[in-house]
Every structure is written in structure tokens, then in C-alpha cells.
Amino acid sequence: MTPRGARRGRQRGLTLLEIMISLAIIGFMMTIAWTTIRSASEARITFVALEERNHEVRVALARMVADLQSAYLSSNEEMMFDNRRTMFIGKAEELRFSSFAHVSLWADANESDQTLIVYYLDDDRQHPGKEALYRKELRRPSNEPWEGEPGEHDVLLRAVEKLELQYWDWTEKKWQETWDSTKQDGEQNRLPSRVRIALTYKNPRGEELKLSTQARLLLPEVVQ
């Protein structure tokens, strides 16, 4: 017969096979835990990137709406000049207009709240092959061509797929693809009552999205 102490000794020990099985189970559980943690981390990073991109687009649209709400035309200028000091010239992917939207950066600055603002698409240097939405602001409107006038250029939104602008003609009750307050036609010396803005862009997942809004112009009549 086997001594009782010897039996107890064998029962307390683990065989090599049992140790290997235990290690395999522990390794499997650690792999599952690491995969879960990594997936959660990647999901969080993607969610933050999506939210940041959406926020960028909404901020850009809000800035355009704020500028457009203060758009104006003035009769206190020489109407025969080729380049008016106040105007509203809109195309499908470009918009140039006079506005009361300028904000002085310091107190008692020798600046007016009148400004000329231009929105347009151009090459995005940080994203080759893509376009960015730019905002140019002229501190002092003049009768010179706006392209050569000094001003502040800001990138409002990078990697833009498409910018679409439409203008509501409140007399004809229809949307128009273009608007020019300086031409001798039905749009002369007046503003559209609304501007529809649509931005097409891609999110960090590569999905193409389109976000749109409307700006209501508060001064549709010429300021005397």
C-alpha cells in the first residue's frame, strides 16, 4: 500500500500538462483583454476625429453666416466706377461682398466696421490635390481691384470637396446660381434676401458628407 503522506504529496503538485494549459488560458484571456482595449481606444480616437471634423465644418458655416448677415450696399459712392466699394457678387464657388462684419482687434483702433469679404476655393497646401475654403478680408474697401489690395487671408476649412452657393431672389421667388449687384439688370443695387451655403467634405473614415445652411441678409435694401 502507498503511504498516506505520499498520496497527499502527489495531490498537491501540478503536472507539466496542467501548467501548460493554465498558461495557455491566461495568454488567451490576456489577448482578448488587449484586443478589447485596443478596439475601444481606436473607436475613441475615430469618434474624436469625427467630432473635430464636424465641428470645423460647422464653425466655417457659422462664420460665413455671420459675415453675410451684415452684408450691405451703399448709395454713398460713385456708381460709375468699375470697382465699387460696396457690392455683392456671387458665383457658384466664390462670393465677394461688402459687410459691416469687421471687428477691431484692439481698443481705439483707427478702423471702421466696414470691410470687403471674399470667400473662394483654392489649392490646399497641407493636402495636395485637395482644395481649401479661404476667407480674405480687406480692412479698407476701395475702388481698386480686390485681388491686388492688401488684406488678411485665412483658411476657413481644409480639404473641401465642393462649395455650393445659391442666392434667393425675393422679387422672382426663386434660387439663382449667380448674383451681381453692379450689373445693369434686375439685381442692380440690391441684395438677395438669403444665401444657401453647402459644403461637401470627407470625414476621417473617408466618407463623403454634405452639410448646408442658410444665411438671412438683414439689410437687403441700399443704405442711404
Image: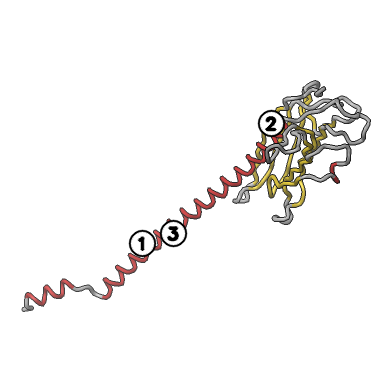
The reply to whether the C-beta atoms of the residues labelled 2 and 3 are less than 8 Å apart is no
Label 1: few (<14), some (14–19) or many (≥20) C-alpha neighbours in 10 Å: few
Residue 224 falls in which quadrant of the image? top right
Residue 4 image point, x, y percent: 7, 75
Image point (79%, 25%), residue name: 169
85 or 122: which is nearer to us?
85
Structural crowding at the residue carrying mark 2, measured as other residues with C-alpha within 10 Å and reported as few (<14), some (14–19) or many (≥20):
some
The answer to which image quadrant residue 58 occupies is top right
Dot 2: element: strand
- Could you classify mark 3 by the number of other residues whose Cα lies within 10 Å: few (under 14), some (14-19), or many (20 or more)? few
**Residue designated by label 2:** 214
**Residue at position x 36%, y 66% from top?**
27
For residue 85, what is the image quadrant?
A: top right
The CA span between labels 2 and 3 is 45 Å
Looking at the rendered image, the quarter that the N terminus falls into is bottom left
Q: Position of residue 52 (x, y in %)?
A: 58, 46
Q: Is residue 39 above or below residue 182?
A: below
Q: Please name the amino acid that badge 1 sits on.
A: Met
Task: Report which residue position mark 3 lands on.
Answer: 35
Give residue 206's mark.
none
Q: How is the image coloured?
A: secondary structure
Amino acid type of disc 2? Gln
Residue 164 placement (x, y as % from top left): 74, 38
Q: Foreground residue, 11 or 194?
A: 194
Q: Is residue 133 above or below residue 172?
A: below
Measured as percent of width and height from the top left, residue 57 is found at: 64, 42
- The mark that comes first in sequence, 1 or 3, is 1
The residue shown at (71%, 30%) is 69
Q: What residue does disc 1 label?
A: 29
Question: Going by the image, does 88 lie left or right of 65?
Answer: right
